[in-house]
Image (cartoon, rainbow, N blue to C red):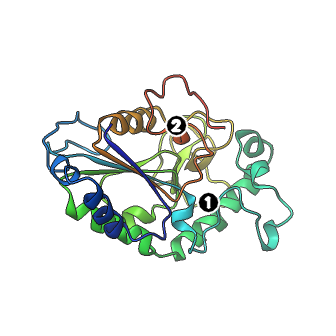
Amino acid sequence: MGTFLRASWSITLPKMLNQQFSKDPHLSRRMCAGRTDNENPRLGKREPGHHRDERTGGEVMVDQKVRQVRDAQTGLWARFKPEELATPRAFLKNPRLVWEWYDWRRKLVASARPNPAHLALVEMEKRVPRLTLITQNVDGLHQRAGSGNVVELHGNIQRTKCFTENTVVTEWPDTADVPPKCPRCGGLLRPDVVWFEEAMPEVETELAFRVSRECDVFFSIGTSTMVHPAAALPGPSASAIAHRH
């Protein structure tokens, strides 16, 4: 890995780049240097060229209505601790409760809009040959803002998967079941997010560590660096980190 930069989401990112260029006259040249990465099965084939890598965390969505999973809840959900709802054990104990909590959160996400931090990253992507955005957020706002090369470490709240088969499900019968049932196996459907006590997605985690090692510039933006394994980025390997803390 080359240069490592840490920033709050409120910093104007192009301004920060200009500051770095003035400190390091060779940085802009390195940002145009050739480098070829392997193919990402989720994102498709990449073009050779300079690689910038960015990690974003919950602070990037701080202006939105969307609350982070560790935040205190409001309204009907104020009496619940998020950690008691975002676990496989909680889902098995009361799947309806967990599904309805996530349905409430999905509606908040649907009404949210990308903020200036999301848009700044889209603009940055236009200015460099290649940029990989690694996010711990599950709201999908980076993609809605226009970012094209996004690695979601903790999944996406708008996706649904089968609890039994661990495969994404896009359609299911319209019944009164809450949560709905998997059309293939009849198992319960759940949000496609990483819960506490669950393993991180192997493909995305290994990809995040690989690109962070190979990139020329690594930005860490709007994250507390408290949640592992993302807190270890940029790091040598993800193989020794099996579960989210």
Q: Is residue 146 visible?
A: no
SS at circle 2: helix
Residue at mark 1: 175
Could you tell me which quadrant the N terminus lies in? top left
Q: Is residue 188 above or below residue 18?
A: above
List x then y, in percent, for residue 163. 60, 40
Q: Depth check: 222 or 152 in front?
A: 222
Q: Farthest residue in the top direction? A: 240
Could you tell me which quadrant the C terminus lies in? top right
Residue 200 image label: none
List x then y, in percent, for residue 176. 67, 61
Along the polypeptide, which appears first: circle 2 or circle 1?
Answer: 1
Does 234 sit left or right of 73 as displayed?
Answer: left
List x then y, in percent, for residue 81. 81, 55
* Amino acid residing under circle 2: Ala
Does 156 sit left or right of 86 as displayed?
Answer: left
Q: Farthest residue in the right direction? A: 79
Q: Who's the residue at 31% across and 52% down the image?
A: 149
Marks 2/1: CA–CA distance: 43 Å
List x then y, in percent, for residue 7. 47, 59
Q: Is residue 5 above or below residue 143?
A: above
Q: Depth check: 167 or 44 in front?
A: 44
Residue at mark 2: 232
* Amino acid residing under circle 1: Thr
Does 198 sit left or right of 167 as displayed?
Answer: right
Q: Who's the residue at 41% across and 32% down the image?
A: 206
Q: Depth check: 26 or 111 in front?
A: 26
SS at circle 1: loop
Q: Is residue 204 visible?
A: yes
